[in-house]
Amino acid sequence: MTAASPPEVLRAPLIVEFPFTRSLGPVQSAFLTGLREGAVLGVKTSDGKVMVPPVEYDPVTAEEIRELVQVAATGTVTTWAWNDRPRPQQPLDTPFAWVLVKLDGADTALLHALDAPGPDAVRTGMRVRVRWAAERTGAITDIACFEPYEGPAGGMAQPHDGDFADAVTGIVAEARLDYVYSPGRAQTAYIAALSERRTVGERCPSCRKVYVPPRGACPTCGVATTDRVEVGPAGTVTTYCIVNIKAKNLDIEVPYVYAHIALDGAGLALHGRIGGIPYDQVRMGLRVEPVWTEGGRYPDHYRPTGEPDADYDAYKELI
């Protein structure tokens, strides 16, 4: 009899994103509002240095600083790196240079993009100026990018009161991570078994514990696990929590119970939702079994089997 070939290791593109909302203090508010109005503001520290972008606390003394100054929109590249493959949402959609620019009147450098035809056109010490965005809203993207500049240097930093009409008081930063995820050999086999309504773990050849989901190696012994073992389908509730906050896009009425469930034969508890019983009747030791929906790729929830509760000593090591 020919042994079945192992399933191809899975890979899938994943996106993790969330909006991060934050309020602005008086210094950051003035800086972003100034960009909207076409002005670059910095802040003067206790030793007289001008920091752009501005900060709210002195990096040397940690004292609050509020003395705003306006610097020029021209400056000098202090260092750079070429980006030949721009990613979505970056300042430019054609190859460009990331540059640190010390604006005229400032003592620190601002990071942004430089629009240049190629890396041969970029050098440390080159002169650049701000290219303003066509529409400005009070964000760092109001600076569309920097561009090469051959004109005269700007003047010294000038005091600024930071007062603007309709000041920007908060921002929403869109955090996003695009990546390709692979669960690896062990979890690929685990997922493939779930599609057949089976739960398969792997046994450590040293301590003999069966891990579900399998990780490819024993986290205790550090030994590779290759011996596959089918566990369950029934199991025991070891610990649980009652969820009272409804999650977005999750069609489950609250309150409901999420539990750690030690499947029969497993040496590690996995988590799952408990259904088919009032939430206030779920308890440690409750015997449960999986419930699958039509076409489901994993158990929708676990329900009581009707068996007597498991003795505490039978699952205490899995809590």
Image (tube, rainbow, N blue to C red):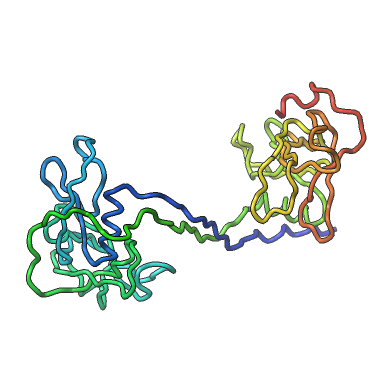
Task: Report whether 283 appears left or right of 245.
Answer: right
> Which residue is painted at 43% across and 57% down in the image?
172
The C terminus is located in which quarter? top right
Observer able to see residue 215: yes
> Which residue is painted at 14% across and 68% down in the image?
126
Farthest bottom residue?
117
Rendering coords of residue 173 (x, y %)? 43, 57
23 or 76, nearer to the observer: 23
The N terminus is located in which quarter? bottom right
Farthest top residue?
313
Observer able to see residue 203: no
> Which residue is painted at 44% across and 69% down in the image?
88
67 or 222, nearer to the observer: 67
Residue 136: name its quadrant: bottom left
Rendering coords of residue 119 (x, y %)? 25, 72
256 or 228, nearer to the observer: 256
4 or 185, nearer to the observer: 185
Residue 136 against residue 287 in the figure, above or below: below
Rendering coords of residue 72 (x, y %)? 14, 63
> Which residue is painted at 26% across and 49% down in the image?
27
Rendering coords of residue 318 (x, y %)? 72, 29
Task: Report whether 302 appears left or right of 268.
Answer: right
Residue 113: name its quadrant: bottom left
Q: How many labels does the image show?
A: 0
